[in-house]
Image (cartoon, rainbow, N blue to C red):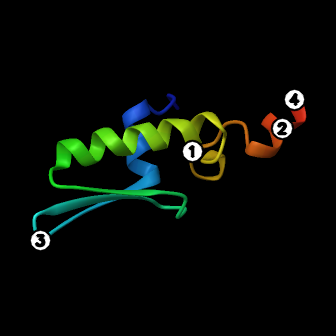
Amino acid sequence: MSELTEFQKFEKCTKVKQAKGRVTVDCVMGLWGVDAPTLEQAIDEAKHYFLQYLSDGEYSSIIGGESVTGKLKEK
């Protein structure tokens, strides 16, 4: 099985909703969310948060990889 691309990881860990001229992208774990007037802007802002939490290991329960606890033990 091949490793997920960054975009596939993003898709697994977020929910996108469009309503009343606004777009929201929320973390499925409830860690963060963004609201913007366009899909492009919402995705751009969401990627920033997603990558931060991904590098911290917050999504290991969803997409695998090293957990937050594992990263803290290294320090």
Up the image or down, 5 lies above or below 17; here it is above
**Are circles 4 and 2 on residues that touch, CB within 8 Å?**
yes
Question: Can you give x and y, in whole percent of width and height, for residue 31 in the image?
Answer: 55, 58
**Furthest-left residue in view?**
21
- In three-dimensional space, the C-alpha distance between marks 3 and 4, rounded to whole angstroms, equals 46 Å
* Residue ID for mark 3: 20
Instruction: Tell me the element at label 4.
Output: helix
Nearer the observer: mark 2 or 1; the answer is 2
User: What number of labels is visible?
Assistant: 4
- Say which of 43 and 5 sits in front: 43
Mark 3 or mark 4, which has the lower sequence index?
3
In the rendered image, the residue lying farthest to the bottom is 20
Asked if residue 34 shows in the view, the reply is: yes
Q: Secondary structure at mark 1?
A: helix
Q: Which residue is mark 2?
A: 72
Residue 39 numbered tag: none
At horizontal 48% and vertical 57% (from top left) the residue drawn is 32
Q: Residue at x 74, y 44 (%)?
A: 68
First in sequence: mark 2 vs mark 1: 1
Q: Are marks 1 and 3 in contact (CB under 8 Å)?
A: no
**Labelled disc at residue 63:** 1
Going from N to C along the chain, the mark reached first, 2 or 3, is 3
Residue corresponding to mark 4:
74
Real-space Cα distance between discs 1 and 3?
Answer: 32 Å
Q: Is residue 16 left or right of residue 37?
A: right
